[in-house]
Amino acid sequence: MDECPTGEVPKLLPENRRFWEICRATLAGLFDGFGGVNLGAISYIMNLYGVPEGQRPIVHDKFLAVIKGIEEVREQERQRGQ
């Protein structure tokens, strides 16, 4: 899908498509059973997908942004549940 029908999700930029592939592959192992972040999963997937050394800091920073977003959503949901 090129555009979100509701307009709530911005269009994925072409330069982020490869990252999104890597991110989706990592999400299942990104958080441990206690909600903590498993940073080793990121390194493992970067090795598996052959992310070049020079691109790894960029990919890592994008992961940190995704993790922050997930944590913010979790906190909002926790506050609504109180």
Image: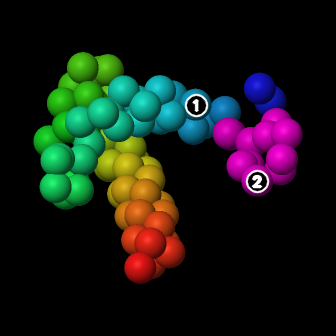
At 66% from the left and 33% from the top, the residue drawn is 14
Q: Does residue 6 show up magenta in the picture?
A: yes
* 3D distance between C-alphas at marks 1 and 2: 18 Å
Q: Quadrant of residue 30?
A: top left
For the point 29% across and 21% down, the residue is 50
Q: Which mark is residue 29?
A: none
Q: The N terminus is located in which quarter?
A: top right
Its colouring scheme is rainbow
Q: Quadrant of the C terminus?
A: bottom left
Looking at the rendering, which quadrant does residue 74 occupy? Answer: bottom left
What span is in magenta? 3-13
Q: Main secondary structure of the magenta part?
A: loop
Give x and y (percent) for residue 39. 19, 48
Relative depth, front residue between 32 and 40? 32
Three-letter amino acid code of the residue under disc 2 = Glu
Image coordinates of residue 57 in percent, x first then y, are 32, 49
Q: Nearer the viewer, mark 1 or mark 2?
A: 2
Residue 51 visible in rendering? yes
Q: Label 2 neighbourhood size at 10 Å, few (<14), some (14-19), many (20+)?
A: few
Residue at mark 1: 17
Viewer-nearest residue: 66 or 31? 31
Which numbered circle lies on residue 8? Answer: 2
Q: Please state if 51 lies on the left or on the right of 38 as rendered.
A: right
On the question of residue 39 being in view, the answer is: no
User: Which is nearer the eye, 68 or 61?
Assistant: 68
> Which of pointers 1 and 2 lies earlier in the amino acid sequence?
2
Describe residue 11's horizontal placement relative to residue 39 as left or right: right
Q: Does 37 appear above or below 73?
A: above
- For this orientation, the residue located farthest to the front is 82
Disc 1 crowd rating (10 Å Cα; few below 14, some 14-19, many 20+) is few
Label 1 amino acid?
Answer: Arg
Which element is circle 2 on?
Answer: loop
